Image (cartoon, helix red, strand yellow):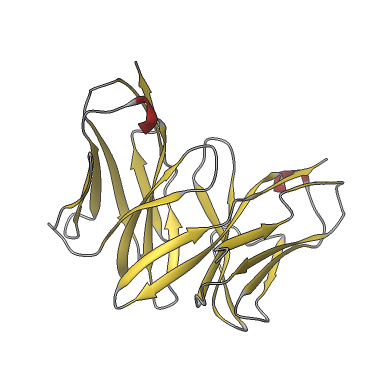
Amino acid sequence: NAGVTQTPKFRVLKTGQSMTLLCAQDMNHEYMYWYRQDPGMGLRLIHYSVGEGTTAKGEVPDGYNVSRLKKQNFLLGLESAAPSQTSVYFCASLKSASGSYEQYFGPGTRLTVT
Amino acid sequence: EDKVVQSPLSLVVHEGDTVTLNCSYEVTNFRSLLWYKQEKKAPTFLFMLTSSGIEKKSGRLSSILDKKELFSILNITATQTGDSAIYLCAVLSGGYQKVTFGTGTKLQVIP
């Protein structure tokens, strides 16, 4: 049981390049989330998903797109990277059962855009 | 817009002190409040609170929720250097289980 995994762990992009971050979970959770964390700040929600094929915007969705084609995977795409997108990106999934909730996080992806 | 505010932003205490961290929120369709500890990696889950007035405890950590006044506190007694971390508060809301985080409280415990 690997929990939540993210690939890659590190990436350096040039301005204007595109990339996709992959998040995978093996816990059969319906809900998945992408956050970014900048120095001195908490986690800001980018997009989230309530199930296969369904996504919703969070607080800071601009410049990002997501897809949830399979329940276990949640992809975050940057179409044209900008230096402002330099951050640590965390993926999470939510265990939801009988009114009890617990969020599990991946190890993070450190992205630098030059 | 959903909002979660934590205070203080940072705190330095000596080992053995007791600290209280605050979290207030304004969200639509509140479901639950979550506390996390973050060291130099991903956040780890501490507590989930859904009902007012029921204290959750885990060792030296405890937390309580007030749904009328829209806040929660996290207490840490007899602090140790291993408690040094960022403590994050998050609120789960809406039918789509949106999870919104506060900016966190950075706690430093010095010997």
Q: Nearer the viewer, residue A91 or B9?
A: A91
In the image, what residue occupies the spot 52% across and 35% down? Answer: A40
Q: Position of residue A35 (x, y in %)?
A: 57, 56
Left or right of B10, for residue A3: right
In the image, what residue occupies the spot 23% across and 45% down? Answer: B73
Q: Nearer the viewer, residue A76 or B4?
A: A76
Seen as rendered, the residue at the extreme bottom is: A53
Seen as rendered, the residue at the extreme left is: B53
Q: Is residue B108 above or below residue A58?
A: above
State whether residue A2 appears in this view.
yes
Q: Position of residue B89 (x, y in %)?
A: 37, 49
Left or right of B105, for residue A4: right
Q: Is residue A42 above or below residue A33?
A: above
**Quadrant of the rendered structure where residue B32 is?**
bottom left
Q: Is residue B107 above or below residue B100?
A: above
Q: Nearer the viewer, residue B84 or A54?
A: B84
State whether residue B29 appears in this view.
no
Seen as rendered, the residue at the extreme front is: A1
Left or right of B34, for residue A43: right
In the image, what residue occupies the spot 36% across and 46% down? Answer: B5
Q: Quadrant location of the N terminus of chain B?
A: bottom left
Q: Position of residue B87 (x, y in %)?
A: 39, 41
In the image, what residue occupies the spot 34% across and 15% down? Answer: B111
Q: Position of residue B27 (x, y in %)?
A: 35, 63
Left or right of A91, for residue B107: left
**Number of residue marks:** 0
Q: Is residue A74 above or below residue A78?
A: below
